[in-house]
Image (tube, grey):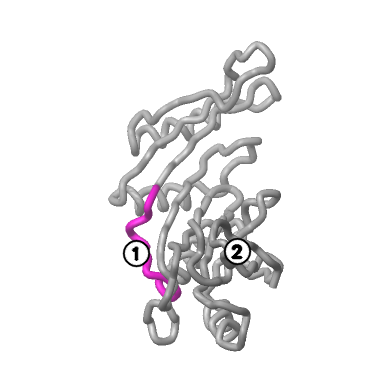
Amino acid sequence: MIAKKPYILYSLPASRITQALIGGRKIENAWEKIKIFLVNCTTADVTIPQNIYLKGYTADEDHGESPELANVIIDKIKKLFGNGTATPVGYHYPDNIPTKQQKIEWQLINDDLEKAIDFMIIGQPWPKYNLGPVDLMLSYDFELIDPISKTILPNQQYTSGILVWLSRSNCISMTLWFPFEQADSEFEKYIDSIEPFLPFKFERKYLRLVRPNKKETANVFSKI
């Protein structure tokens, strides 16, 4: 979508994808930071994510991982949410034979959210496997608000959003569209107001000014 007017974007490059969540490895701490951000800085309802996915992984036995503990974890998830959908984590090259290791995915509903969060918290510390052994992924779309006045920022051209992974390593990917045409004092004032609520370390190097080109056929990105 071509921008109608300039705006400021905060997003990670493809080479990085995610940032660590503030709160360390404790899932309850990281989740609390997410809730604080959503309540104070966005229009999102914490209890209504766009998507909720729980993923469990069997052990990578070909590389020496023990299957017993991973299987116990998957059995516990099945008792809570049913069987899920199992797929290979990959395929061997060049014969395209599926790997023995599997990923089991559960697409949950909003009523499952609290139960899924509790499961992730109670299960800590999660054992160290190359994949998983279990990840909870949540996505939220929203408009940005002023945390002081609680009003929606005007002239937001796009919907902002976050992807959150709660697991042995908690992380986040975000796309924040700030409706400011330049990094002026008003923009700096807004960033100062939301920074205490952000669930990740705000890194200015990921800010970009986005504007339409002269023909309005493409967006042009420049560093701030």
Q: Amino acid at mark 2?
A: Asn
Which numbered disc, 2 or 1, marks the residue closer to the eye? 2
| Count of numbered labels shown in the rendering | 2
Compare marks 2 and 1 and give the one earlier in the sequence. Answer: 1
For image coordinates 53% across by 25% down, the residue present is 102
Residue to which mark 1 is pinned? 45
Residue 122: tell me if it is visible.
no
Residue at disc 2, secondary structure: loop
Residue to which mark 2 is pinned? 213
Farthest residue to the left: give it.
111
Residue 143: tell me if it is visible.
yes
Main SS of the magenta part reads loop
Of 214 and 131, nearer the camera is 214
Task: Residue 168: give x, y in percent of width and height.
Answer: 59, 48
Residue neighbourhood size for the residue with mark 2, other residues' Cα within 10 Å, grouped as few (<14), some (14–19), many (≥20):
few
For image coordinates 57% across by 65% down, the residue present is 212
Residue 119, relative to residue 100: is it above or below?
A: below
Q: Amino acid at mark 1?
A: Asp
Quadrant for residue 96, please give it.
top right
Task: Residue 166: give x, y in percent of width and height.
Answer: 52, 51
Residue at disc 1, secondary structure: loop
Of 154 and 103, nearer the camera is 154
Quadrant for residue 77, please give it.
top left
